[in-house]
Image: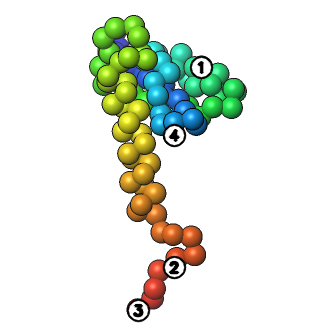
Amino acid sequence: MTETTLKAVMQFDGNTGQFKPAAHNLTAEKAEQKAAKLKSQGLHAQVLDQPSRHKGRAFKTCQLCQDAADAILRQQKDQAQDAPAIGERAQEE
């Protein structure tokens, strides 16, 4: 029997500017369905791999999910800081 990789779905909350958990402990298929449903409602959603099953059923209060949601925002901020500013060109030597 093959081991199924669990997925979590994170949703961007435009009111707070933060990601928040939308689901966890899902199969890949169910996670993609959940993300597609959120996107059809005009919301930004992201599917993440879960290294292990999260305890409890309540994704809204799951600390592991919240940590993952916070990590998305940190990663995006880090990438934005590394990107060159608009109009900035590499100087040739």
Residue positioned most to the front: 15
Residues at circles 3 and 2 in contact by the CB criterion of under 8 Å: no
Q: Residues within 10 Å of mark 2 (few under 14, many from 20)?
A: few
Q: Tag 3 or tag 1, which sits nearer the N-term?
A: 1
Q: Is residue 45 visible?
A: yes
Determine the residue positioned at 38% across, 45% down: 74
Determine the residue positioned at 47% across, 34% down: 19
Gap between marks 1 and 3 measured at Cα: 51 Å
Gap between marks 4 and 1 measured at Cα: 24 Å
Q: Tag 2 or tag 1, which sits nearer the N-term?
A: 1
**Is residue 18 or residue 7 the one in the foreground?**
18
Determine the residue positioned at 38% across, 54% down: 78
Q: Tag 1 or tag 4, which sits nearer the N-term?
A: 4
Report helix, strand or loop for mark 2: loop
Q: Is residue 5 visible?
A: no
Gap between marks 3 and 2 measured at Cα: 12 Å
Which quarter of the picture shows residue 61?
top left
Q: Tag 4 or tag 3, which sits nearer the N-term?
A: 4
**Which residue lies under the disc numbered 4?**
17
Report helix, strand or loop for mark 1: helix
Observer-side mark, 3 or 2, equals 2
**Which residue lies under the disc numbered 3?**
93
Residues at circles 4 and 1 in contact by the CB criterion of under 8 Å: no
**Which residue lies under the disc numbered 2?**
89
Gap between marks 3 and 4 measured at Cα: 41 Å
Determine the residue positioned at 45% across, 88% down: 92
Residue positioned most to the bottom: 93
Residues at circles 1 and 2 in contact by the CB criterion of under 8 Å: no
**Which residue lies under the disc numbered 1?**
33
